[in-house]
Amino acid sequence: MEKGMINLATLELRQSLRSPAFWGYSLLFGSFVALMFAFGITESQIIGFVGLSRLMVTFMQVTMVILPIYILISTVRAVVGDRESNVMEYVLSLPVSFSGYYWAKFWAKFIEIFIPVFLALLGATIWGAISDIDVPWDLFIYYSMLLVSMVFCFVGIAMYISARAKSQNIAISTVFILWLLLVAFLDLILMGLMLKTRMDAHVVIFMGMINPLQVFRTATLALFDPKLTVMGPASYYILDTISRIGFIIFAISYPIIVGVGAAFLGNRYFKHNDII
């Protein structure tokens, strides 16, 4: 790992710490956990989940809605924004390679986005331990790994789009359309496609499972609802094709592969094209 990349990533993180947007984002998740404690959500129960387990399940459900779109919009300007403001030309005149610049942006964005949401989850766990509430460490580890997977996935996708986009407006429009497509293909369009074309149900479910948002949603439910009953008949295909443990491993590894793959493609384009 080159020194220039580490220095640039450190500089990016320091700049983030001075940004009101970063502290607002951090405060959002911290306040959400605090409010859940204040309203006594740890004392409620749903399908066997009580205490911190109940809080973590609710936290992850909300995170799945907010975090992906925040990652896409905040990260997609990383490269194209520097190019439009002419900052990139100055930075690349310093002792840092094209790849060093690109990966410094990637890792800075990953740390900037992951740490606040992880600290919110960790803070809830520590507060529960102090308050003599049973801490579900297995659930904490699983959801932490799922958060890592989600952030890797969408930071990688956003970095690829940022490297390819010609302007910030195009980049933001692209990620917004991508987000709409991912949300639409969770259930609504897939069911309509199956009914309209009489497509094989296995093909439709496979199409759903290549959607990272669908994978995250199903993975969150895997501990909340081990038999995935809320998904209806699709649960039989998923659990018959792959075991519950196998699906959990897939849910963590697949989005990481997608994110890292997209990031590498973005880096390749960045190095071999006249991006300045």
Image (cartoon, rainbow, N blue to C red):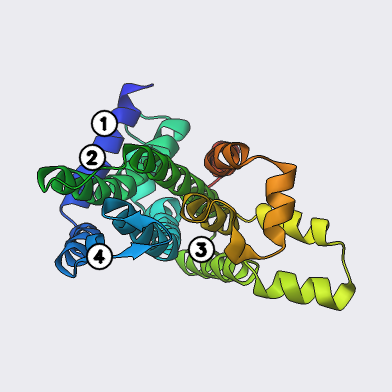
Secondary structure beneath label 1: helix
Instruction: Name the residue at 35% across, 62% down.
Output: 58
Q: CB of mark 1 within 8 Å of CB of mark 2?
A: yes
Left or right of 274? Residue 105 is left
Question: What residue type is disc 3 on?
Answer: Ala
Q: Earlier in the sequence, mark 4 or mark 2?
A: 2
Q: Which residue is mark 1?
A: 7
Q: Is residue 40 visible?
A: yes
Image-based side of 254 in relation to 159, left or right: right
Task: Answer few, some or many: residues within 10 Å of disc 3's Cα (few below 14, many 20 plus, some between 14 and 19).
Answer: many
Label at residue 11: 2
Q: Residue at x 60, y 42 (%)?
A: 244
Mark 4 and mark 1 residues within 8 Å of each other at the beta carbon: no
Q: Are marks 3 and 1 in contact (CB under 8 Å)?
A: no
Q: Which mark is residue 171?
A: 3
Spatial separation of the CA atoms under disc 3 and disc 4: 39 Å
Locate residue 43: give its quadrant: bottom left
Q: Nearer the viewer, residue 25 or 161?
A: 25
As displayed, is residue 190 above or below residue 118?
below
What is the CA distance from the residue labelled 3 to the residue labelled 2? Answer: 24 Å
In the image, residue 196 sits, relative to residue 40, either above or below, namely: below
- The residues tagged by marks 3 and 1 sit, at their Cα atoms, a distance apart of 26 Å
Q: Amino acid at mark 2?
A: Leu
Residue nearer the viewer, 131 or 271: 131
- Label 2: few (<14), some (14–19) or many (≥20) C-alpha neighbours in 10 Å: some
Label annotation for residue 41: 4
For the residue pair 167 and 266, the one nearer the viewer reads as 266
The earlier-in-sequence mark between 3 and 4 is 4
Pick whichever of labels 3 and 2 is earlier in the sequence. 2
